Image: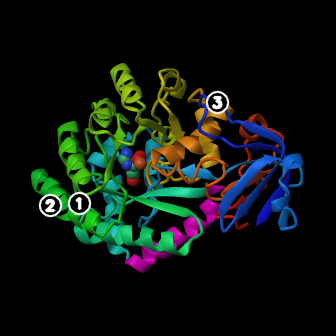
Amino acid sequence: MQLLTNISTLYTCKDEGSQGDLHPIENAAIAWQDGVIQWVGPESGLPGEFAGTEVFNAGGRMVVPGLVDCHTHLAFGGWRPDEFEMRVQGRSYLDIAKSGGGILSTVKATRQASENELYKKASDLLDKITGSGTTTIECKSGYGLSLKDEIKTLRVYRRLADAKPVNVVSTFLGAHTIPPEFKSKREEYIHLIMDDMIPRVGEEKLAAFCDIFVEESAFTADEARRILERGKQYGLRPKIHADQLTSCGGAELAAEVGAISADHLERISDEGIRAMAEAGVIGVTLPLASLYTQEPFLDCRKLVDAGVGVAVATDFNPGSAPSYDLTLAMMLACNLGRLTPAQALKGATLYGAKAIGLDDRAGSIEPGKSADFLVVDAPSINFWMYHYVPDREIEVFVGGRM
Ligand code: NIG
Ligand code: FE
């Protein structure tokens, strides 16, 4: 049995009440064994059976659940700093994509990289990401766009899941865009996804989810419906990159196909919000992507008020969101998405876990869940979000290990 004591306030973030209810415990302690939480409560009420074990001291600081980044594109070849300058100069993300830049330039670099090269780069990034407080991460393929290169990427994620202390869950995103060799044969590419890629990913259990980019420059809602239904036949739960740059009915489709989440949503319709609330689809806000593509920010408060649970994630990728700083995304979700700091925290913990189906073992500090938590050197959640600094001192416990 291991213990963490001397916690000023422990924000459990358990699944009760509204998105802003963090269910705090003052002067708290946590006990865990073999990486699983056994007891949480006020230190004065610690049962005798948990005493006299290995004890860590939080030094009177606050403790929150380990952060859950439920939307990243972690493994990719190359970077795209020149597109950043182009967008700053006024060219749009869609315009750059149409002229062969954007996702396709990363596809080229990812195809050229060996599995080991991709692994090394993603592994180094993941170590930094973990150090910044993320203890559970979702990682998408989607820069291979051939059977071989999609499998290569998903194998990298499987290796990371085996090698690293963090929880890694993978998503198949073969439907990220149409690759150049299928430019004038999009139906053939859709068949490749449905008949070759999805069966292989499903049979080898290389992913838990099937995602698709529903967008003018990528796939229509009708194409997405077919692909996501096929994914379901192979046990892949749907996710959608929806209504990011144009309003294409992505949110409505997410509700229709029973997606676990719909992500981006900058241009979601009121009907889309209603449909998601009714179907219980989690909305994932990705404010770093809005920032870097100079798009309007999602009004998260409108979703929360309509009864949609909102998760906050980074969308980390080399194009639209080249930062993996989830705390920064949370701060932006407050300032520009109108979430309160408490709502943003539950969005980057419990609701993030819900968006990837891991809320039975991550996202809150409760008995039975993985011992993933952060000791944060800030006097309150409000102060942490308000005085955003990239180098705030954080002690990360993942699977009970510091
Ligand atoms: O989530 N929107 C589509 N896909 C990514 C962008 C990928 C890229 O620009 O490389 C996103 O923003
Ligand atoms: Fe994305």
Q: Position of residue 39 (x, y in %)?
A: 73, 53
- Element assignment for label 1: helix
Q: Is residue 9 above or below residue 303?
A: below
- Quick check: can you spot residue 179? yes
Q: Nearer the viewer, residue 8 or 160?
A: 8
Q: Is residue 129 above or below residue 347?
A: below
Q: Which residue is mark 1?
A: 198
Q: Which residue is mark 2?
A: 195
- Element assignment for label 2: helix
Q: Amino acid at mark 1?
A: Ile
Mark 3 residue CB less than 8 A from any atom of ligand 2: no
Spatial CA distance of label 3 from label 1 is 38 Å
For the magenta stretch, what is the residue range? 114-134
Q: Is residue 72 above or below residue 202?
A: above
Residue shown at the point (34%, 32%) measured from the top left: 251
Q: Which residue is mark 3?
A: 20
Q: Nearer the viewer, residue 50 or 105?
A: 50
- Quick check: can you spot residue 7? no
Q: Quadrant of the C terminus?
A: bottom right
Q: In the picture provided, is 103 more to the left or to the right than 5?
A: left
Mark 1 residue CB less than 8 A from any atom of ligand 1: no
Q: Position of residue 385 (x, y in %)?
A: 71, 38
Q: Residues within 10 Å of mark 2 (few under 14, many from 20)?
A: few
